[in-house]
Amino acid sequence: MAESIDNLEERIALARRNLEDLTEQATGASGAASEERIAARINDQQDALNELLRMQEGLERKGPA
């Protein structure tokens, strides 16, 4: 289970970095189509991060096997 928690933590960190990168891209984006595309990617990434955090919370509740 520790391996799965470690993997999950790595995926969470990656999702957070992706959100930071997308936010930086959004500040430099021009044009409605570009802004909408980045906004959709941010929403998708935030949804993925939320799911990973729920999974992490579930594993933490279970505790050590």
Image: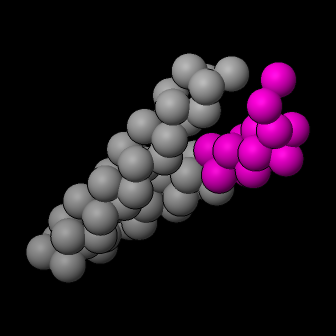
**Which residue is located at x 68 percent, y 44 percent?**
56
- Comparing 37 with 10, the one in front is 10
Q: Is residue 42 left or right of residue 44?
A: left
Quarter assignment of residue 4 = top right
Q: How is the image coloured?
A: one colour
Image position, residue 58 (x, y; %) = 81, 44
Q: Is residue 65 left or right of residue 54?
A: right
Q: Looking at the figure, which quarter contains the C terminus?
A: top right
- Comparing 14 with 42, the one in front is 14
Quarter assignment of residue 8 = top right
Q: Is residue 31 above or below residue 58?
A: below
Q: Give yes or no for residue 30 being in the magenta stretch.
A: no
Whether residue 48 is visible here, answered yes or no, is yes
Q: Residue furthest bottom?
A: 27
Q: Magenta residues, as a range? A: 51-65
Q: Is residue 6 left or right of residue 31?
A: right
Q: Is residue 24 above or below residue 5?
A: below
- Comparing 4 with 63, the one in front is 63
Considering the whole magenta stretch, tell me its main secondary structure: helix
Image position, residue 16 (x, y; %) = 40, 56
**Which residue is located at x 68 percent, y 21 percent?**
1
Q: Residue furthest right?
A: 62
Q: Give yes or no for residue 52 being in the magenta stretch.
A: yes
Give the number of callouts: 0
Q: Is residue 35 left or right of residue 51?
A: left
**Which residue is located at x 13 percent, y 75 percent?**
28
